Amino acid sequence: MARLFKWPVREGKPVSAAALFSGYRHQRSIACGASSLTEGRAVRQSARLLPAAALFIFAALLPPGDARADGHDVEGGMIAWPEHEMERALDFLIERRMNDLDIRGAAVAVVVDGKLVFERGYGVGDIGGEVPVTEHTLFEAASLGKPIVAFGALLLARERKLALDAPVTESFDAPWLKDAHDRATVTPRHLLTHRSGLSNNLRFGSRSTGFEPGSQFSYSGVGYMYLAEVMAGIEETGFDRLMRERVFAPLGMHSSGYTVPEALVDRVARPHVPLWMPIVALVGPALCFLAILGFLTLLIVRFGFERLRVRPVELLPAVVLSPLLAGGLVFLGFGFWALIFSLGYLLVWLVALSAVAFSLQYLRVVLDQGRSDRVISRGRMRRHGLDPAMLGIAFVASLLFMFWQVPGPMRNGDDLNPASSLRSSAHDLGLFMAGFINGAVIGPEWRARMVSERVEIGTRGRSRVGWGLGFGTRETATSFTAWQWGSNVGSKSLMVIDPSRRAGVVVLTNAESGDRLVQEVAGHVLGIDGSWRLP
């Protein structure tokens, strides 16, 4: 168990000249990108930058540690800036990086001193839609729902309905775990800190542990599924209803839910993935199965029929079974709609390849006829088979489009999974961060225990990584943050809270490439050690 983390009081820090320069780098970037604006607007922006430039020159002459920026701690990231400066810089940074990373929609909320001070949406919720993302747009928040589950569990623990260090079966006796030893050993603390031994396979996770509970760390979504089952059993109600009544409503998170009405599913920001993902999801396993089945066919022919040569017809079972097995694998791993989407994109790609290859072949025939001065009329044209080179050219050309973002499948509204099905907005998650920082609902003592009662996982670079009662923790020589990422296919998100400064940021995106944006924004907002990165 790590040393207990005391919930600290906000303190000021000296600001170096280098940090001051870093704090205003976005203002210079805005000026560099102003060529598309009118001349008058550009002049006004430049005029606003002059005080910052002068301040930087003055600060550069001061010894490190003595510099100040009008009393604002710039080294601490954007949360130390005046709010209007933070808003302008975030707008520029997010819009630019969304364009660079081909992200359709994003939403951000920032909490400073326990108050929600900034919330905004960017882009659109769907590649073909015109409805802009706002701070109230629902996203697939995925694993950001885990610390909220933990929040609800500690509320029950505070009410003495759930004992953190006693076997789960003492709070709610249900035959969820298969093994009697596991039922007598696994505690809520094991589930909250990912030390239960349960797996992270949310669709087909085993209800048996893979190691002695409490002996090691292994990230487990199945553990949170079990915890949610226990919480619902204790309160004798459905889990989603429990969370809405006991957590979401008191915090003002009226749009959030682990399930949503089917009428609202289309209002959730649609996940987007690069085109290659659904294609490779089928083609990759199909080629692997084909290689395995082809090799087995070779062995059967060689040792069963005592022949060295395999006839083409003997490979037909392998050719037929391989795509069927690949489709079954996608269905088992991601569900029916993921299979339909993958199959649809694969067929479109194959049709496009064929069309381009035949067009190139036709163009080649026309050029050949023209060079020989022959007339093409009444369909009389020299017959040519499809040249494999044309298909190869079409395939290479298609690689240029493989990183295009395409819409992915939406999760059904009634698809409930406490570890991955949270649908929420930047506004609601901002309220959760503010409530957590202020000790709302569960009180300051239990709020602090969520990060203080943590287990050590290891080190990542200069960071010590641990896991508390619901949050991951990252500690350096100068900072401490609690965090949780969200990663469903086509949706990436991140929540980071700095308890000592009573601040936090949450970023939601509807793109597979959003993992880079969420970390960059968290780094710029909190300014911890230059940037915040997932351990």
Image (cartoon, rainbow, N blue to C red):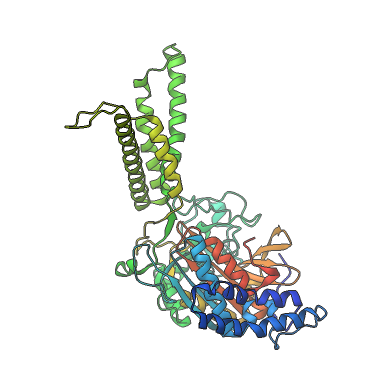
Which quarter shows the N terminus?
bottom right
Residue located farthest toward the bottom when viewing the structure as drawn: 70
Expressed as whole percent of the image width and height from the top left, the position of residue 341 reads: 35, 51
Residue located farthest toward the front when viewing the structure as drawn: 373
Expressed as whole percent of the image width and height from the top left, the position of residue 8 reads: 70, 80
Q: Is 251 left, or right, of 346 in this rendering? A: right
Residue depicted at x 42% and y 67%? 258
Quick one: 304 or 521, which is closer to the camera?
A: 521
Q: Is 177 left, or right, of 454 in this rendering? A: left
Vertical arrangement, residue 409 with respect to residue 166, above or below: above
Residue depicted at x 58% and y 53%? 197
Quick one: 152 or 108, which is closer to the camera?
A: 108
Expressed as whole percent of the image width and height from the top left, the position of residue 407 reads: 38, 57
Expressed as whole percent of the image width and height from the top left, the position of residue 373 reads: 28, 28
Residue located farthest toward the top when viewing the structure as drawn: 306
Vertical arrangement, residue 137 with respect to residue 225, above or below: below
